[in-house]
Image (cartoon, rainbow, N blue to C red):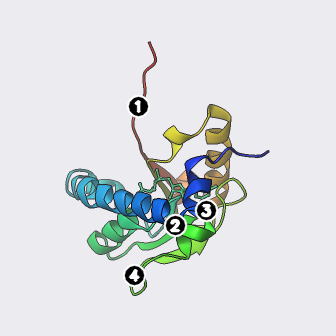
Amino acid sequence: MQHERGPWDLAGQNPAFGDLFNEGMVSDSSFIMKIVVEEFGGIFKGVTSLIDVAGGLGGAAQAIAKAFLHVKCSVLDLPHVAANAPASTDVKYIAGNMFESVPPANSVFLKWVLHDWSDDECVKILENCRRAIPPRHEGGMVIILDMVVFFF
Ligand SMILES: C[S@@+](CC[C@H](N)C(=O)[O-])C[C@H]1O[C@@H](n2cnc3c(N)ncnc32)[C@H](O)[C@@H]1O
């Protein structure tokens, strides 16, 4: 199945656009992750390792790693994004494609990802997330931070 990646392909072909977009997402994370950590930090209780799927430059993963020292955080994103990942952070960056596979972890985190894709594509992404984590009774968890869109 070929996934229409639109802006993500453009970001790979046009570094100026890619840099601007990815820095914008980091900026978003510095705002929203403060709220996640302070208001909803309890969801990370029991999480030992976490993969931030399509996590960009890792703003969200860095915030989680800093707030919850027991959580080993990794970021999965396309190769041209992972290639620009910041050095010297506690977060590990992995180049890959969430439609092919998601590296194993105790939990998966998806921030501002699913709303970009069709229902069928979301099912594919979530199937790969499910394969990456242990069963629920062994602590496996998928944490989704996204907007709810209503069509009238
Ligand atoms: C809206 S951004 C969200 C970034 C990050 N989760 C955040 O909230 O800051 C969507 C991200 O999906 C990544 N992406 C797009 N297609 C992907 C794929 N097939 N596999 C992995 N990442 C992908 C893009 O490179 C981009 O970083």
Counting other residues with Cα less than 10 Å from the Cα at mark 2, is it few (<14), some (14-19), or many (20 or more)?
few
Of marks 2 and 1, the one in the foreground: 2
Q: Which residue is mark 3?
A: 13
Residue 57 horizontal/vertical position (percent): 44, 68
Above or below residue 32? Residue 81 is below
Q: Residue lying furthest right in this view?
A: 1
Cα gap from disc 4 to disc 1, whole angstroms: 31 Å
Q: Which residue is mark 1?
A: 148
Cα gap from disc 2 to disc 1, whole angstroms: 30 Å
Q: Which residue is mark 4?
A: 90
Q: Secondary structure at mark 2?
A: helix
Dot 1 or dot 3: first in sequence order is: 3
> What amino acid is labelled 1 in the image?
Val
Residue 37 horizontal/vertical position (percent): 25, 58
Dot 2 or dot 1: first in sequence order is: 2
> What amino acid is labelled 3 in the image?
Gln
Q: Which residue is mark 2?
A: 15
Of marks 4 and 2, the one in the foreground: 2
Residue 55 showing in the rendered view: no
Of marks 1 and 3, the one in the foreground: 3
Between 26 and 139, the one nearer to me in the picture = 26
Counting other residues with Cα less than 10 Å from the Cα at mark 4, is it few (<14), some (14-19), or many (20 or more)?
some
